[in-house]
Image (cartoon, rainbow, N blue to C red):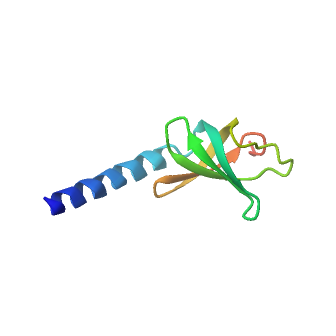
Amino acid sequence: MRARATALRAAGREKLARFAAAQVGSRRALLVERIDRDAGLAHGLTENYLRASLPLPTDKTLVVGRRVEVEIEAAAGERLVGRSRATATS
């Protein structure tokens, strides 16, 4: 039973990582949950419940509890890395 549970958790993580990778290049709404000024990053949850981080814009417009549109640039396992549309280069 323990081996089966371990295998199921691993399969779930793999599917989640593939789903995260499929989001690269898309635009998503992100709810800002935490700002780490020391690291220069904001962290939050996308509209499809994936964890994401993005660099803080120089104008410091990100606020905890607010939604921001994010362009997803990369996936690191189950996490996304993006850029605020206000600071994304097109």
Residue, x 47% and y 48% (percent of image)? 20
73 vs 7, left or right, is right
Query: Quarter holding the C terminus?
Result: top right
Give the x, y percent position of residue 3.
17, 63
- The furthest residue to the right: 59
Residue nearest the observer in this picture, 66 or 76:
66
Residue nearest the observer in this picture, 52 or 26:
52
Residue, x 66% and y 41% (percent of image)? 70
Among the 4 quarters of the image, the one containing residue 45: top right
15 vs 48, left or right, is left
- The furthest residue to the left: 1
Query: Quarter holding the N terminus?
Result: bottom left
Residue, x 29% and y 58% (percent of image)? 10
62 vs 47, left or right, is right
Give the x, y percent position of residue 64.
71, 43
Q: How many marks?
A: 0
Give the x, y percent position of residue 44.
61, 46
Give the x, y percent position of residue 74.
57, 53
Residue, x 36% and y 54% (percent of image)? 13
38 vs 25, left or right, is right
